[in-house]
Image (tube, rainbow, N blue to C red):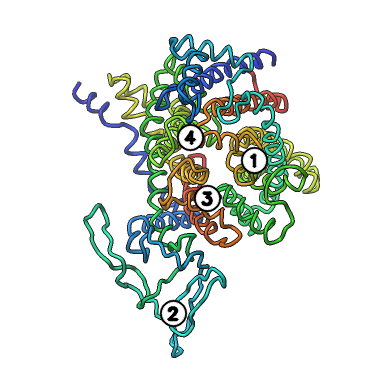
Amino acid sequence: MTQYTLRRLLVALPSLLGVLIIVFLMVRLAPGDPAQLLAGEFADAATVERIRERFGLNDSMLVQFQRFITGVAQGDLGRSTRTNRPVTTELIDFFPNTVELALASIIFALVVGIGLGILSALKSNTWIDALSMILALIGVSMPTFWFGLLAIRFFAVEMPLFPVAGRGTFSHLVLPAITLGLSSTGIIARMTRSALLEVLGQDYVRTARAKGGTPRSIVFKHALRNALVPVLTVGGLEFGSLLAGAVITETVFTWPGVGRMLVTSVLSRDYPVVQGTVLLIAVAFILVNLLVDLIYGLIDPRIRYD
Amino acid sequence: MTDTNGAADRPAPKPERQRRQAPRWRRRLARNPLAIIGLGLISGFLVIVLFAPFIAPYMPQTQDLRTTYVPPGAGVSFRGPDGQAGIWVSPVQRSPVRGIEINDSVAYPVKLFQRGPAYEWLFGLVKSDLHLFGVDGPVRFHLLGTDEQGRDLFSRLVHGAWISLFIGLISVGIGLGIGAPVGAISAFMGGWVDMTVQRVVDTLLAFPGILLAIVLVATFGTGLTNLMIAVGIAAIPIYARIIRGSVLSIRNREFVEAAGALGRRRMGTLFKHVIPNALAPLIVQSSLQMAIAILFAAGLGFLGLGAKPPQPEWGLMLARGREYLAVAPHVATFPGVAIILVVLGFNLLGDALRDALDPRK
């Protein structure tokens, strides 16, 4: 296990390096003068020169990259050209909100998705099954922002059950979490159904039936435990995607997270913030995937580490 | 010697297998009701793209500031002034004070094949002013209502359909054209080539979902063309990863060894024997990728990173509708329905193809 963990960590390292390279190159490959981009659109010549000096944009790419990595390692991602605050501070302020939203969404998606999947598998080839799977597929096919808008219209404007936007109380969280989690719910429901159907056809389930187990005990004591292993893995991976998917949901609900920050900064060409946000989301995604892999190994002893 | 060479050139086991298998997967597909629904949705979408200016009664950019936010069905009745059946339209106007006003005293019939605004289609090949339907009279018939500038929402949706199709096709094209060969070569060569390519793929996959497209748009600028390329590039690692798996499972099979033993060059073997046998998952992915690309593009359009006004891109239309959600909810509703139907079509087809092409079934 230790060896597996180490090997998995080593495999993640090149991805991390690749992400750093891409984020570094973003400003250099963008059309225009990188110093101007980093200084912001309305910066005067002196400021641009100062930025060029400060970031050493006249040095060779390699030297610049080395300096960039050193900066990242020390938590220095530059300053926002819009607010002039350090990017790291901005990220520390806003990232927890995104994690909060993504966590709420994945909990919603797991509870509803697994429930729907179990129902579907137990009633397989009935109208209940068909209906839940069509619902799941619509969940996957729906633009989240459209659902968000409809949710705002019906549950915040016409029936003011929840606030229209913003963050604060639990009721602020409900609509954005459902909106963000909807597509994951569909994926998890479909996954649960197929995994459970596969397990229900296996010999040991037949044995449990032969021993006289009730349908309920067979599903919940024997089948579900094994069926849920891949489902939880998918759930973990989905959580990573939700961190990025939050970009749209946060914009719809003006949720103060890094996703909305990313969009605002792309639109205002605030490159230091774009770089910092992208880096953070990608690194978080890599770490979540790594964690999921490790947990997968822990909960399923059949996984071999070689 | 000539004989054996001929055997190597002939893709040995493939034609036979395909002849036996092709009807089977097609039969499976035809038996699956969900596949039929998916194909129906996609066909409808293609028809709309192909005949957009004919199907849409008006041009997508024609404004009428006297008829802003007309809800769908306003001024429409199913009985004419003398009790005739059919669809009849009365003049509708928005008053700044009193809101929507309908002049019931007159009504004009909606007829099929009406003359309307002139259009050029298929790069100027077709010039016409014939539309599928229109009002025989001096009023406009807004099937799905109008937006904030009094533009006909139905016409805008119909005229914007090609954008979604293009985005999907370009994304699949880039994925298939770059991702698949790169992934296949990487898997077939193995060694350091595979190692290097896979690390690059890993890196691209480290950007979850829509993030890679946002990174590319942020780097190269917003706009429809960049958005299409960005969504396409985001598809590359997915294709590379998928074909790698199938090539790895095929490259040690007997017929591949046979091609090598018969003196075919490695790349020739790869493109002639291995890739054709690894296509099934790519076909499935292409249908699903169309769905993903359309959703991504709509999302980016919604965020303001894609198409620019007044382009009738569905995501952008939704974003505009968002601002008037309380006054005119239909403006945001219908583009979303259009996106769902198209994405659902490609998802249903992809699912059905996966089932039909699955050799285990």
Q: Chain of mark 1?
A: A
- Pointer 3: what residue? B319
Q: Position of residue B340 (x, y in %)?
A: 52, 53
Disc 2 is placed on an element classified as strand
For the point 32% across and 28% down, which residue is it?
Answer: B271
Q: Quadrant of residue A260?
A: top right
- Pointer 1: what residue? A195
**Disc 3 and disc 2 on one polypeptide chain:** yes
**Disc 4 and disc 1 on one polypeptide chain:** no
Q: Are marks 3 and 2 in contact (CB under 8 Å)?
A: no
Comparing labels 3 and 1, the label whose residue is closer to the camera: 3
For the point 47% across and 17% down, which residue is it?
Answer: A49
Give above or below for A147 relative to B245: below
Q: Are marks 3 and 4 in contact (CB under 8 Å)?
A: no
- Pointer 4: what residue? B213
Q: Position of residue B156 (x, y in %)?
A: 42, 58
Disc 4 is placed on an element classified as helix
- Pointer 2: what residue? B88
The disc, 3 or 4, on the residue closer to the chain's N-terminal end is 4
Q: Position of residue A216 (x, y in %)?
A: 79, 48
